[in-house]
Image: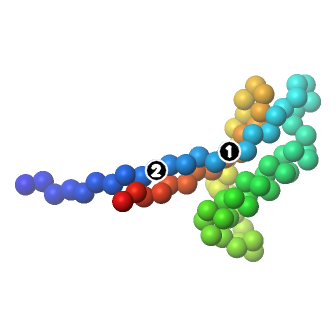
Amino acid sequence: MATFTSRTITTTRREWIVPTNYPRGACLGDMEAALGAAARDYRHYYNLSDLVTLPDDSLSFTTTDEAIVIAFTVETPQP
């Protein structure tokens, strides 16, 4: 007789999108504002103090033709 359990996990991806203006790219002020907002949200989701350094892999950065996207994911077990 097989023994197993199952679970359902919901994954939420949070993104901050900074537009890039060809050929200049993204502006420093926009990047700093988006990074600060993403870091605050990450700390909120994971209940981290401002005194704790964020893990190196906490936020990811990807690029598209029109934007730089800062993101992280949160997994939430469901009943």
The disc labelled 2 sits on which kind of residue? Thr
- Name the residue tied to disc 2: 10
Q: Position of residue 18 (x, y in %)?
A: 80, 39
N-terminal-most mark, 2 or 1: 2
Vertical side of 57 occupied by 65: above or below: above
Using the rendered view, name the quadrant where residue 25 is placed: top right
Report the disc number at residue 71. none
Asked if residue 55 can be seen in this view, the reply is: no
Report the quarter where the N terminus lies. bottom left
Left or right: 19 in relation to 41 = right
Q: Position of residue 57 (x, y in %)?
A: 64, 54
Relative to 55, is 78 on the left or the right? left
Residue at 77% across, 55% down: 37
The amino acid sitting under disc 1 is Glu
Residue 47 image point, x, y percent = 62, 70
Verify CB contact (< 8 Å) between mark 2 and mark 1.
no
Question: Which element is circle 2 on?
Answer: strand
Q: Position of residue 56 (x, y in %)?
A: 67, 57
Which quadrant does the C terminus fall into?
A: bottom left
Q: CA gap, disc 2 to disc 1?
A: 16 Å
In the picture, residue 66 is in which quadrant?
A: top right
Q: To which residue does mark 1 refer?
A: 15
Residue at horizontal 40 percent and vertical 57 percent from the top: 78
Q: Quadrant of residue 49?
A: bottom right
Horizontally, residue 30 falls left or right of residue 39, namely right
